Image (spheres, rainbow, N blue to C red):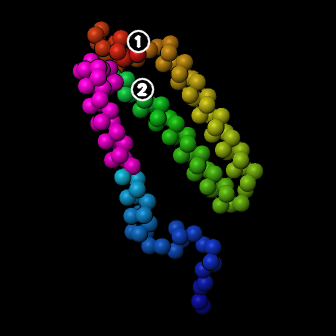
């Protein structure tokens, strides 16, 4: 018995796994390298413009950025995966609800995170290693 594949079948179902990994991993690695270069160049310009205290302050504040980024990526990637699953099932109503829930959740988490960081900014900066000299730069 011969199996035929439909013309509109996804490349994920037909292409070899090695080619798919290369097709999606290479752009991801390039984007990570560009992001790293951006951070390095940013630190160079901060060092030239503000000095070593500016570099220290951005390094103290960087974990706050990473926490916010990780939460937004977690919600965004989860919402995108849910959307893909529901669209694959042809369930448009639940796909719309899932995207709406993800948007509401990321908005709520952003507001809560901003409130927590604004209220507890000094203990958070202490936790991340701010000294009395770095604190004014980190607050700016």
| Picture coordinates of residue 63, whole percent (x, y) | 38, 28
Residue 128 is left or right of residue 10, and the answer is left
Badge 1 crowding class, 10 Å Cα cut-off, few under 14, some 14 to 19, many 20 or more, is: some
Check disc 2 and report its element: helix, strand or loop.
helix
Residue that appears at 42% across and 26% down = 64
Asked whether residue 55 is in view, the answer is: no
The stretch drawn in magenta includes residue 20: no
Residue that appears at 52% across and 74% down = 14
**Which residues are drawn in magenta?**
31-59
Residue 5 is left or right of residue 45, and the answer is right
Instruction: Look at the picture and state if 93 lies above or below 138.
Output: below
Q: Which residue is mark 1?
A: 122
Badge 2 crowding class, 10 Å Cα cut-off, few under 14, some 14 to 19, many 20 or more, is: some
The label shown at residue 51 is: none
Instruction: Check the image and name the residue furthest to the bottom.
Output: 1
The stretch drawn in magenta includes residue 53: yes
Instruction: Look at the picture and state if 20 lies above or below 85.
Output: below
Q: Which residue is mark 2?
A: 64
Residue that appears at 62% across and 56% down = 85
Q: Main secondary structure of the magenta part?
A: helix
């Amino acid at each position: 018995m011969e199996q035929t594949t439909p013309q509109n079948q996804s490349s994920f179902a037909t292409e070899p796994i090695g080619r798919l990994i290369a097709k999606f991993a290479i752009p991801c690695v390039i984007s990570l390298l560009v992001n790293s270069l951006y951070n390095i160049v940013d630190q160079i310009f901060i060092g030239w413009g503000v000095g070593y205290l500016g570099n220290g302050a951005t390094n103290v504040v960087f974990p706050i950025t990473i926490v916010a980024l990780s939460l937004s990526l977690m919600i965004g990637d989860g919402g995108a995966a849910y959307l893909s699953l529901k669209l694959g099932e042809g369930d448009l109503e639940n796909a719309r609800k899932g995207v709406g829930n993800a948007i509401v959740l990321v908005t709520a988490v952003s507001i809560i995170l901003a409130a927590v960081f604004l209220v507890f900014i000094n203990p958070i900066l202490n936790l991340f290693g701010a000294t009395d000299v770095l604190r004014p730069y980190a607050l700016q």
